[in-house]
Amino acid sequence: MRLKINGEIKKNILAATLKELLEELGITPGRVAVEVNMQVIKKTDYASFRLYDGDVLEIVNFVGGG
């Protein structure tokens, strides 16, 4: 599958769900917000949210600071 993630085309993605994609990319789900095709996805939906070829994702990491 081919996805556009944070403006970059990623090919050969094996994940079928958002949760699987985050695992494939080595991203901890609890520390990010994810938008798919301009729709913010709830963390509780990551495991069931299906991805499709050509989807556009924005993954935003939360960073603490002071």
Image (cartoon, rainbow, N blue to C red):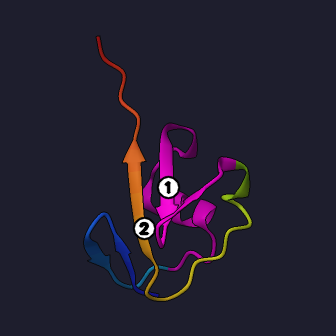
Query: The C terminus appears in which quarter of the rendering?
Result: top left
For the residue pair 36 and 51, the one nearer the viewer reads as 36
Question: At label 1, which amino acid type do we have?
Answer: Val
Q: Dots 2 and 1: beta carbons under 8 Å? A: yes
The residue lying at 53 percent from left, 58 percent from top is 23
Callout 1 environment at 10 Å: few (<14), some (14 to 19), or many (20+)?
many
Is 42 within the magenta?
yes
Q: Which mark is residue 57?
A: 2
The residue lying at 35 percent from left, 84 percent from top is 11
Rendered position, 56 above or below 23: below
Question: At label 2, which amino acid type do we have?
Answer: Leu
Task: Read off the residue under disc 1.
Answer: 34
Which secondary structure lies at badge 2?
strand
Left or right relative to 57: residue 42: right
Is 40 within the magenta?
yes
Callout 2 environment at 10 Å: few (<14), some (14 to 19), or many (20+)?
many
Q: CA distance from mark 2 to mark 1?
A: 7 Å
Left or right relative to 59: residue 14: right
Left or right relative to 52: residue 8: left
The total of numbered circles placed on residues is: 2
Q: What range is drawn magenta here? A: 14-43
Quadrant of residue 12 within the rendered picture:
bottom left
For the residue pair 33 and 39, the one nearer the viewer reads as 39
Sequence-earlier tag: 2 or 1: 1
Which secondary structure lies at badge 1?
strand
